[in-house]
Image (tube, rainbow, N blue to C red):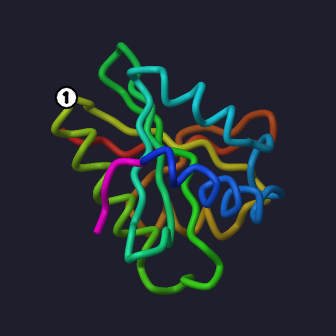
Amino acid sequence: MIRAVKSDDLKTIVEIYNSYQQNFEFPIDELFLIYSLNNKNFKIFVLDDNIINGFCGIYFYPDSSAEIGPIGVDENFLNQHIGTSLLNYVLNFAKENNAEKCIARVLDKNFNAINFFKKNKFVAERVDDLKIYFVKYLI
């Protein structure tokens, strides 16, 4: 079941995120997530099958766009379409909340994420500072 994050989930999200630290721009901790979740424009959703298998965040900008991320799947549950399920859920949530496009920032060395977003019909829009900016229009 995909649902909004609860405070009890934060430790697991941090563990999953930090297990892939080399693929993200910076490390996070529970305090960072608490601070981020206090921003009304940021949401995190988790896939919960009695344990947290993965998570996906979304940040809404005032210009009718949203940014996907972070997104992560517990390494014990890879290749089970969990990331795709979370992404589709978050894209639908974005559309329901009037986002016209979603972007995703990916480090240029994170080949799994690059392939993931391409597979999910995101298009590379630009590259700078070792990051690739993907976009998917929702309208």
123 to 63, vertically: above or below: below
Residue 69 position within the rendered picture, expressed as x and y whole percent measured from the top left: 53, 45
Look at mark 1 in the image and give the residue it sits on. 98
Relative side of 57 to 109, left or right: left
Nearer-the-camera pick, 122 or 38:
38
Most prominent secondary structure in the magenta stretch?
A: strand
Would you say residue 14 sits in the magenta stretch?
A: no
Image quadrant occupied by the C terminus: top left
Local secondary structure at mark 1: loop
Residue 101 position within the rendered picture, expressed as x and y whole percent measured from the top left: 33, 35
Q: What is the span of residues highlighted in magenta in the rendered image?
A: 1-5
Determine the residue positioned at 75% across, 63% down.
Answer: 20
Determine the residue positioned at 19% across, 28% down.
Answer: 98
Which amino acid is tagged 1?
Asn
Furthest-top residue in this view: 62
Determine the residue positioned at 65% across, 70% down.
Answer: 112
Image quadrant occupied by the N terminus: bottom left
